[in-house]
Image: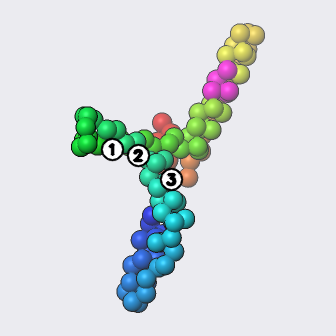
Amino acid sequence: RVWRMSRKSTASRTDAGERPFWLFTQDAQRLFQHAKDRVYLVHGVGEGDNPKLTLERVLEPNPKWTLLCDVLGEIQGHREELRGQGVARVGVTVVVCRDDRSASNAR
């Protein structure tokens, strides 16, 4: 999001002939570096003054899906407890999604 916002800001200002000064500050550079560090791991292969660098994408898990998995795990544990107590019908769990894409990801 930050990258997209900065690109829009850069494009709109350069069209108008202005330069976005904040992109060249140390704080902006730190922001971009931290964003890159969250997404990429840099590996150095080789020895000496010229090691070959490779980038590995490391994406963080989506918190929404992590929480959904946690809740579904709790529900499953509760269902197993009920079955252990002799309850024959424990019900159905329904997950409602906003759109088809989210529903296909939830499956």
Residue 88 can be seen, yes or no: no
Q: Which of 67 and 101 is in front in this view?
A: 67
Disc 2 residue type (three-letter):
Tyr
Q: Which numbered disc flags the more N-terminal residue, 3 or 1? A: 3
Question: Mark 2: few, some, or many residues within 10 Å (few <14, many ≥20)?
Answer: some
Q: Nearer the viewer, residue 66 or 57?
A: 57
Callout 3: SS: helix
Badges 1 and 2: C-beta atoms under 8 Å apart?
yes
Magenta region, main secondary structure: helix
Residue 55 can be seen, yes or no: yes
Q: Name the residue under label 2.
A: 40
Q: In this view, does 8 lie to the left or right of 31?
A: left
Callout 2: SS: strand
Expressed as whole percent of the image width and height from the top left, the position of residue 18 reads: 43, 87
Which residue is found at the position 33% from the left and 44% from the top?
A: 55
Which residue is found at the position 31% from the left and 38% from the top?
A: 44
Q: Is residue 89 left or right of residue 25?
A: right
Q: Is residue 36 left or right of residue 91?
A: left
Disc 1 residue type (three-letter):
Leu
Query: Which region shows up in magenta?
Result: 73-77
Question: Mark 1: few, some, or many residues within 10 Å (few <14, many ≥20)?
Answer: few
Q: Which colour scheme is used?
A: rainbow
Q: Name the residue under label 3.
A: 34
The label on residue 55 is 1
Q: Distance between the residues labelled 3 and 1?
A: 15 Å
Q: Distance between the residues labelled 3 and 2?
A: 10 Å
Q: Which of 52 and 78 is in front in this view?
A: 52
Residue 76 belongs to magenta span: yes
Q: Which numbered disc flags the more N-terminal residue, 1 or 2? A: 2
Which residue is found at the position 63% from the left and 27% from the top?
A: 73
Disc 3 residue type (three-letter):
His
